[in-house]
Amino acid sequence: MRQPATGTRSVDTGARLRICVVYDCLYPHTVGGAERWYRSLSERLAAQGHEVTYLTLRQWDRGTDPDVPGVEVRAVGPRMRLYSSSGRRRIMPPLVFGLGVLSHLLRHHGRYDAVHTASFPYFSLLAAALVRPLAGYRLAVDWHEVWTRSYWREYLGSIAGMIGWLIQLICVRVPQRAFCFSRLHAKRLEAEGLRGETTTLSGEYAGPFDGLAVREAEPLVVFAGRHIPEKRVSALVPAVARARQTVPALRAAIFGDGPDRAAVMRAVIEHGLGAVVEVPGFVAGERVQDALSRALCLVLPSRREGYGLVVIEAAAHGTPSIVVADPDNAAVELVADGENGFVAPSASPEDLAAAIVRVHAGGLALRAATAAWFADNARRLSLDDSVEQAIGA
């Protein structure tokens, strides 16, 4: 890590560093893009010879090993339910985790050369910032998302939303080296008054660089992710029903689970698609990858994405993606319209169905173009490249 920030001790980039990675979730005990990033980041840092400690909440049974090769995993808080029944993050786990991080860093304040933390949940970042003057470590912060004041208000209401936005603003103003995974959120971070440098990392893809065998597509549409309002999973069902008017054999596999699962199941029944839409819940990653390899396309109708890793994973198989143009959706940065998929103007059944039909019409030529896009961009979008940028920053 080059050029230490004011008030931090100098760090030799060629030395074996003592790095503390901070996130309240750990893959595969919880599943998501951030979880994959922090586990992979920790493993790769350890493989490079650094001494890595991972602070998290306990999500595994007592007496079992969380088993992250080369990484010391420390639970600084108990197992807690992270999400409410509506799919929103509960407030108590971030508070407990923040206090656990604060306690650990105070007790081990001379142990680390660098602390690398997620911005969210914010209390752990505030804890790391509070201890840093005493410890002198470098503070690196990943900003997967930066929410606007209006989105905070929409998400939590006028009073709680304002409090959430103010806490985010305080975290932005903490002196730090900031990392973002999209141009969208890098611009927002700087506009909010970041005190430090911003680096836009290339990506989070951890698969093979040379791509996978491109298979002829089946008439199958795939979704993979949590079933929460922001993902708009249920919008896919009427879109499939409409697209079947042009592609009668079209089917869908909707992987994942969450509070909107019931709405998805209702939509399947209402549209009479029980025989053609599969909703199996969370499944092994190998099953998702197999479906992506056979799929006509991936459909990600989210209104809000901090990155969109599954778009790259689909492209590795030569499978195009459909995303939606929304102000909070950074996944659109991963789709070159007409090259590795399409950007639908909205998540309406008409717009999503039209995009699915366009993918079908593109046939093998579009799959070849998607595979070529992946070949051209895989290394730039790779986890390894991001790790090198983060360490070298």
Image (cartoon, rainbow, N blue to C red):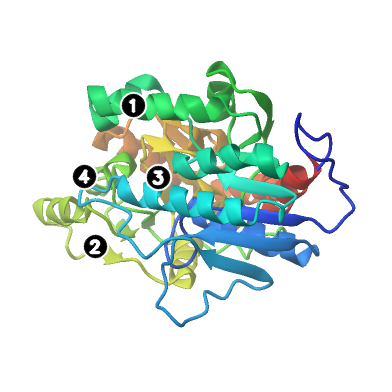
- Position of 309 relative to 284 (above/below): above
Q: Give the quarter of the figure containing the N terminus.
A: top right
Badge 1: residue crowd in 10 Å (few <14, some 14–19, many ≥20) = some
Residue 198 in percent (x, y) is at 67, 29
Q: Amino acid at mark 3?
A: Leu
Element type where label 2 sits in the image: loop
Q: Residue at x 43, y 72 (%)?
A: 284
Q: Quadrant of residue 199?
A: top right
Q: Amino acid at mark 4?
A: Pro
Q: Quadrant of residue 359?
A: top left
Q: Which residue is mark 3?
A: 300
Q: Amino acid at mark 1?
A: Ile
Q: Which mark is residue 238?
A: 4
Q: Residue at x 58, y 34 (%)?
A: 182
Badge 3: residue crowd in 10 Å (few <14, some 14–19, many ≥20) = many
Q: Which residue is mark 1?
A: 163
Seen in the image, is 4 located left or right of residue 242? Answer: right
Residue 52 in percent (x, y) is at 69, 62
Element type where label 3 sits in the image: strand
- Position of 188 relative to 343 (above/below): above
Residue at the left extreme of this rendering: 270
Q: Quadrant of residue 201?
A: top right
Element type where label 1 sits in the image: helix
Disc with the residue nearer the chain's start (3 vs 4): 4
Q: Is mark 3 in CB contact (under 8 Å) with mark 4?
A: no
Q: Residue at x 26, y 33 (%)?
A: 348
Q: Is mark 3 in CB contact (under 8 Å) with mark 2?
A: no
